[in-house]
Amino acid sequence: MENHFRPSATDPGFDVVTENRFYSDKDGSEWEETAFSLNGTRWGSKRPPFPLLQPEKVLSLPLDLRLTKDYRYQLEGVEKVDDHECYAVRFEPLTGSHSLYRGMVWIDTKSFVKVKVQAVQTHLGIPVVSNEEIQHFTPEATVEDRPLYLLSGFTSRQIMLIAGRNMLVERMVRFSDFEVNAPSFSEKRAISRAGGNIMYRDTDEGLRYYLKRGDKRVIEDHPTMSAKALAVGVIVDPSFDYPLPIIGVNYLNFNFLNKDTQLALLFGGILALANVQRPKALGDKVDVNLDLFAIAVPVNDEVFDSHGEVRSERLRDHTFSAGLNIGYQLTSFQKLIGNYQLRFDGYSRDSQTTPDFATPASTFTNGFGLGYEYRRSGYSLIGNVFYYRRGFWRSWGLGEGFSPDQASYKKFSMSLSKDFFIQPFHKIHVNAAYYGGSRLDRFSMYQFGLFDENRIHGVPSNGVRFSDLAMFRGSYSFNLFDQYRLDVFVDQALGRDRLLDDKWRSVSGLGVGFNLRFLYGTLLRGEIGKSFLPDLYRGSGSVVGQVMILKPL
């Protein structure tokens, strides 16, 4: 079983792969986890805990024989699947009151066995927004000289609403080494139950941990709905006066205060990121969440010309931001998002700022935006448009860079991403994006912070800025010796600063990341990036790195 997910387009992502011994009979299904790997590192029995996030259990399947009618069927024609001529039959649920499926089933025209099913689950419970599965059935045994077709593998793509964002989770499951009606079935299952490995059992309420209590296994009635980890690390970025230490807690709770409210928190001492989310706030399709970002140290706001940094115009900026997001799930794969952002910039002088350089007014900025997301078949298409209005805006600098019209400005962006999985720990990620706007100035142009969606490896958080930005980013992740995962990043962008000229300038970034199991059951993650900048930004710094140790608690 492979599980792949990526919190953001710039995050290298997480890959969880397990090997299992699966048992199924008329009383149900259960399985024993015999191996667990996280980001290429194989763990023992004390592997990190994970919440069981799953779609709502569907008790009425499309082809079950039932006395009640749950589905409507329609023959679409005859299609070929592999070497089989198949009837293509579409099915739709007759009611929307509970979770069912809609999709297509391909049935062999000669043997009338299921060969393939493609289905989308409806009426899902939180935090699952959508669940699409493609199932394959192949002859894996013979009973009375007739082939027995069994589920041999499936691909599931789920959209999870986590920390106020839709996150795509791709799952691939492959079955092999079938034993049908084996005389040793009960004996082998008893051995698994008596062992010390983690086990799961499929129940009418969904998947549950099958815990060992003494000599017996019992079903865990209350599935795990939270996860937390100690986070210790350091961020090195030329935009700050010194490396930023991170010491804090990473916490995620899917049932915060027992009210189906979700809390995500990263508190790292000098910085804090938090999100409180209420799925299904108004009916089944509307969710509401609140964002918060704060950092205790100022960032150096720098300006460069062809000779390097203009030290006489350096400023310092203390920032804080909060946001309210309202999402409307149009379909299983499409979502509209309304945004309100409140940002505070506290500008101050640097010791090298000349007396005749006027400091901008510290100000709150209100932002109103609309976003669109489409996620299906592993693709993620995201578009946003924002209008911003500064609360206070007066002449700053030496006068030539200021315009009263820039008290308000607009931004828009479009991004397309896709992951390709070659093997469980070999994947390629590609992303193409464009960012633009109008009336952008020094303090509103696009920059490349560690937490920005347009990040480029090796480019410092401040100083390098563009009003228009087109970029392509790619990465390749692979596993070494079942102990290490290495990530190689290649970023290429073209940016234009309309305040200078209409020239497009090239910005390139290369990066290397690593993941490995560390001391005392910790996970060590790190990245270092080197950028290649235009001569205009000479002296801004071109190496950015971070190292983080995560200890599951």
Image (cartoon, rainbow, N blue to C red):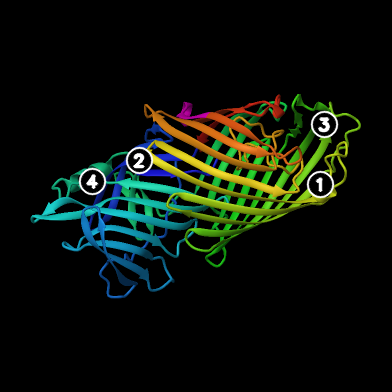
Residues packed near mark 1 inside 10 Å, few (<14), some (14 to 19) or many (20 plus): some
Q: Which residue position is annotated with label 4?
A: 189
Q: Name the N-terminal-most of marks 3 and 4.
A: 4
Task: Identify the residue at image location x=23%, y=46%.
Answer: 189
Q: Name the N-terminal-most of marks 1 and 4.
A: 4
Residue 225 seen: no
State the mark number for residue 18. 2
Label 2 sits on what residue type?
A: Thr
Q: Which residue position is annotated with label 1?
A: 363
Residue 397 seen: yes
Look at the picture and state if 502 lies above or below 404: above
Q: Which residue position is annotated with label 3?
A: 313
Determine if the magenta segment contains residue 518.
yes
Is 82 displayed left or right of 17 in the figure? Answer: left
* Eye-nearest disc, 3 or 1: 3
The CA span between labels 3 and 4 is 72 Å
Is 251 displayed left or right of 217 in the figure? Answer: right
Q: Name the N-terminal-most of marks 3 and 1.
A: 3
Q: Name the N-terminal-most of marks 3 and 2.
A: 2
The image quarter containing residue 352 is top right
